Amino acid sequence: MSTKEDANPEVEAPPKSGLNMVGLLVLGLACATTSFASVFFLAPSPAAATVAVETAEPEYKPKEEPPAAKSQAYTPVQEILITIGSAPATRYLKMQVSISTDKSNAKDVKTAETALIDAFLLYLRSVEVSDFEDPHFYNHMREQLSRRADLVLGDGVSNGVMITEFLLR
């Protein structure tokens, strides 16, 4: 038979305290703190992201007139007419160029015009007809003419050579 003592054995029930709840709150607070710290300290700074955007895509600012255009002058040089190729001189090149320079140096270009034509002709005589068939040759030719203009006029006088007329027959 059972007695009251048998029905209630002396088994200790877990103590009911607030320690478990406090532990969960501390654990949640620690997780929130580490999450915030990792995002705050490991995320890239906004200044670095802004700099990357600025260097990748420059901002377009329309200008009324470039400042260089006010002081720029284009001095035309005599027309150049030269035969191209070897023995049978059946092909010729007719070319008109202008030298880009500062307005203060425009007189120097006119004074050295004969020397410029001579330097240009020496280069153009070395060019073959097959060179003109290559589309990349024209940029090379302009660079070579600019280089010879710099040699004749001196460094800093010429800002480049503009080909205004070009005829190959």
Image (cartoon, helix red, strand yellow):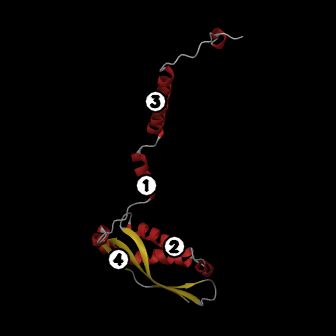
> Where does the image place residue 130, in percent across and percent down from the top left?
63, 80
The kind of residue on which mark 1 rests is Val
Nearer-N-terminus badge (2/3): 3
Upstream in sequence: badge 4 or badge 3: 3
Secondary structure found at label 4: strand
The amino acid beneath tag 4 is Tyr
- The residue shown at (42%, 67%) is 150
Tell me if 152 is positioned left or right of 62 in this view.
right
Of mark 1 and mark 2, the one earlier in the sequence is 1
Q: Which residue in the protein does label 4 denote?
A: 74
Per the model, the C-alpha gap separating discs 4 and 3 is 74 Å
What residue is shown at x 35% (from left), y 74% (from top)? 109
Q: Which residue is mark 3?
A: 29
Residue 25's place in the image compared with 41, above or below, is: above
C-alpha distance separating marks 1 and 3: 37 Å
Q: Give the quadrant of the N terminus.
A: top right
At a point 46% along the width and 41% down the height, the residue shown is 43
Marks 4 and 3: CB-CB under 8 Å? Answer: no
Tell me: residue 96, above or below residue 8.
below
Q: Quadrant of the C terminus?
A: bottom right
Name the residue that disc number 1 marks: 53
Give the CA distance from mark 2 to mark 4.
Answer: 19 Å
Depth check, mark 1 against mark 2: the one in front is 1
Per the model, the C-alpha gap separating discs 1 and 4 is 38 Å
Q: What secondary structure is found at the residue carrying circle 3?
A: helix
Q: Residue furthest front?
A: 1
- Front disc: 2 or 3: 3
Q: Which mark is residue 139?
A: 2
Q: Amino acid at mark 2?
A: Asn
